[in-house]
Image: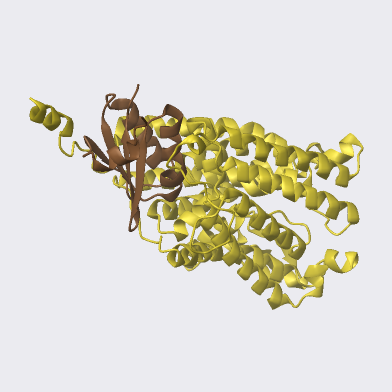
Amino acid sequence: MTIDFAKMLTDLEPDQVLDVRGETCPFPALHSKKMLQKVAPGTVLEILIDHPPAAEETVPGICAAKNWPYVSVKEGGYWRIKIKKTSK
Amino acid sequence: MVAWLANLPAMLPGWLLVGLFCLMGIAFGVILERSRFCFTTAFQETMEFQNPWILQGVFLLIGLSALIFGGLVQLGVVHPTLFRQGWFTIVGGFLFGTGMSVCGACASGQLFRAGSGYVANWMEFVGAGFGGILFALFFFPSVEGPALQSAATTPIAVYQVLGIPPAVWGVVSGGIFIALAVWVRRFLPQRKASGYQEKRFTFSLREPWHPYAGAVALTIVTVLYVLLSAGASMSINTPNTLTIAWLVNLVTRPLGFNLAQAPWFAQGTVNGQVISRLSPLALNQINTPHFGHHLGYVALGLWLFIPITILGAFLSSWRAGEFHIRIPGKPSKLLWYLFGGLIMGFGAAMGLGCNIGAWTDSFAVRLDLSGILFGVGLFPGVWFGTQLDEWIAERIWGFGRTTSVARSAAVRREQQMS
């Protein structure tokens, strides 16, 4: 049986929210990386981000490198990226 | 045909040249904005996040351009203006790399971000202009000016040193960079994520472009730019400096200090009249090879190309529904971008160019040695600037605007279970 992490994440409420809207490179990605390093495994972190390169490529890259499931939804002028930190 | 292309600036009407550079500026802004093309992002994200998603585009741009310009130089269509190289190339590259990494955007990257509404990058643009002015007033006359007159800094074409034709060198170096552009794709971590959708190879104004599409479009603009300027490398920092200097001069000239007469800005006299970078049309008095009496029109076009790029990026982001004014959470960040811009502008003036002028075009257009030396300073500068960003982010700013525990969902889940 495969677990649909995307569906699960969509329904989960975040434990923490990081709002980096208004920021430009390198800080949206840098703050996201530091925050993901800081929170405990098991945490669901939601990042609000309006910087396209970080939302489209860098944050998904950070998650993929660690195998952390994420869901990215664009809402108007910004993205809501919900990430489940499943490991250290 | 070869002679006509080599003398294109002299053949075309002067104001048409200016208009074409303005149109190319619009195109340049659109391409940078749609493909998110930024060299700092390319270097910084590869170093910091092991994610070369934009580096693949940078390599393709260099590879395609090297192939084309190797041939054009061989045919005699293009006579690139080679750059002098020396200590100033390395030190300038380091300062430029540091400044651009502090700001997270290089000379070209700041343009499309400024046009997309990022106030921080407006500060960077202003800072870069002041950095260039400080260099011109305090460093150029006594230090770099004499160094640029020295025989030791005579430009070196790599293919001449190797004793091979430029077309062959273009094929070799172009082939290496194109191979790199394909090879680095295997290191994109996001490609293995289930929810990730890679951008399409498209030129639609309504969606973001794949970095390869940006690279192809930028190669076309580079070819047109070089042909219309009879061999000039793309210049971003000098027009940035001129734009800010022109604005500053509106204040200082009535007070008795005319920047147009200052060192670096003033380039000599013709018929008793000072020829200044701030009044480029005066250059039309001079009759020069490839330009005839159109050197001033080309200089004006090269200048306008840059502020108009910001307009092009604005139109592009607005058309895509992505334009909005973005202000960092901590106002002190604006000063950080001003500081970074200052270092970047000073370094670019010292190193004779930015990522495009001093680095990319060295491999892609001029086929000279200066880009290798610029890179020797540039990459340590990128590393150092990124460390400064990390340091200040951790110690001064913390995280984003409203880092908060929205609600302790984990605790609530536990309570519900018990």
Residue B252 in sight from this viewpoint: no
Q: Quadrant of the N terminus of chain B?
A: bottom right
Q: Nearer the viewer, residue B321 or B196?
A: B196
Q: Is residue A82 left or right of residue B79?
A: left
Residue B156 appears left or right of B35? right
| Nearer-the-camera pick, B298 or B418 | B418
Check the rendered structure and report the hue given to chain A: brown
Q: Please identify the quarter of the rendering in which residue A75 is found.
A: bottom left
Which residue is located at x 67 percent, y 60 percent? B221
Depth order, front residue of B30/A1: A1
Residue under the image location 36 percent in, 29 percent down: A1
Query: Could you tell me which residue is drawn at 85 percent across and 52 percent down?
Result: B71
Identity of the residue furthest to the top in this view: A88
Q: Which chain is yellow?
A: B
- Residue A10 visible in the displayed image: yes
How many marks the image carries: the answer is 0
- Kindly indicate the quadrant of the structure image that contains residue B381: top right
Rendered view: B257 above or below B405: below
B158 lies above or below B380: below
**Percent of width and height locating residue A88:** 35, 21
Residue B399 appears at what percent x and percent y? 30, 36
Most foreground residue, B102 or B322: B322
Compared to residue B235, the image places residue B369 above or below, namely above
Residue B231 x/y as whole percent: 78, 57
Q: Is residue A1 left or right of residue B145?
A: left
